[in-house]
Amino acid sequence: MLVIGGGIIGLVTAWRAAGRGLRTVVADPAPGGGAARVAAGMLAAVSELHYGEETLLGLNLASARRYPRFAAELEEASGQRIGYRPCGTLAVALDADDRAYLRDLHALQTRSGLDSQWLTGRECRRLEPMLAPGVRGGLRVDGDHQVDPRLLANALLIACERAGVVFHRAQTVRLTVEGGRATGAELADGARLVAGQTVLAAGSWSGRLAGVPPEMLPPVRPVKGQVLRLRLPVPPAGSPPFLSRTVRAVVRGNPLYLVPRESGELVLGATSEELGFDTTVTAGGVYELLRDAHELVPGVTELPLVETCAGLRPASPDNAPLLGPTALPGLHLATGHFRNGVLLTPVTGEAMAELLATGSLPEEARPFSPARFSAPRAERARVPEEQPV
Ligand code: GLY
């Protein structure tokens, strides 16, 4: 079995497939890289809920529920920590528009049977004293946690190696197809990998692989996110931390989040830009993130800024992943995870391994079959519009 792409989705697929006894090869010039090196790692099934994404919500919740066991299993298999932190999330409003947006979100969450609690501005600041005095209210979501995606990627890489996954460190240039079946891939170093089953898990690049029949290329596009990393002060003994949970807001229509790690890192994100494969960090992107973060938590501008980076979210037309077989025998997809790649890692690994080992996807993954985009054009038009992050 061959996995094209060694980001977290490719790695979890390989790790779980190897665990089912399949001989597994991953092709990637730098496995463990990709969007996870940039992502903040929020497991935000409830606080990132959007209208029209109820089906995706079911998969997000199923994966969130798996996280504690998944983290323990992966840490055991790799001997590495992945920074899973059940700290909860507070989504706050700075003005009347943000407040109205959060009220709508709260109503949607309640209708969807989700747990979130409306707080006044004062209650928000009691929970997180570094919040700006102007905070007008917020939603406390105790079930939305975080993980460190860089640690997650490193641990998956080691777990794969320990499970006997073979890494071929080169770019894939072409899927090979013989007799109407995918048969493996050709790599930039001239290698030819032969496989009975191939999983295309190349994130934003999944829609561009040569050799895949055009009508089977996944409709995936890159959505750029710029992210900053700051260093938190070590609080004096007995003092509260700078932030004790993920804090998020929509500031002037831009979604913003601050994710404090136990390691002392504070991740601040993210822009959302449709600029193709561009990953330039721009002065404007950094300015807007810091300007908005300063309105939310004024003390952030005192912190050392230690890193700026940009990554590409692999977005699909309905914001949900493509999981499962294509119409080309032997070719499967695990891509299009958009804003939820880190959250969906556990459930994706299990679903893909089940497919590879048994030939059929588990029930919960079936709505995400690539076949939903093979419907006639008129059907496709009913897919909901993309929502901002
Ligand atoms: N899920 C956070 C983001 O996509 O920025």
Image (spheres, rainbow, N blue to C red):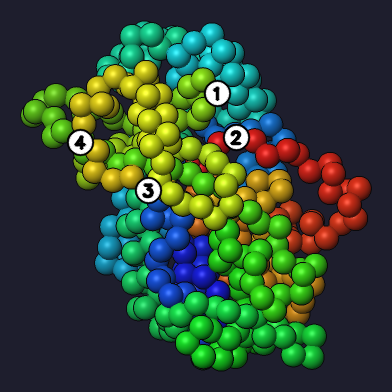
Residue 134 vertical placement versus 68 (above, below): above
Does the Cβ of the disc 2 residue fall within 8 Å of ligand 1? no
| Furthest residue toward front | 283
Depth order, front residue of 12/212: 212
Distance CA(mark 3)–CA(mark 2): 20 Å
Residue under label 3: 309
Q: Would you identify the image quadrant in which residue 177 lies?
A: bottom right
The kind of secondary structure element at disc 3 is strand
Residue under label 4: 304
Depth order, front residue of 184/51: 184
Q: Is residue 32 left or right of residue 232?
A: right
Residue under label 1: 253
Residue 325 x %, y %: 72, 70
**Quadrant in which the C terminus is drawn:** top right
Residue under label 2: 388
Residue 158 vertical placement versus 300 (above, below): below
The kind of secondary structure element at disc 2 is loop
> What residue do we see at 55% from left, 23% from top?
253
Q: Would you identify the image quadrant in which residue 175 lies?
A: bottom right
Q: Would you identify the image quadrant in which residue 156 lies?
A: bottom left
Q: Are marks 2 and 4 in contact (CB under 8 Å)?
A: no
The kind of secondary structure element at disc 1 is loop
What residue type is disc 1 on?
Gly
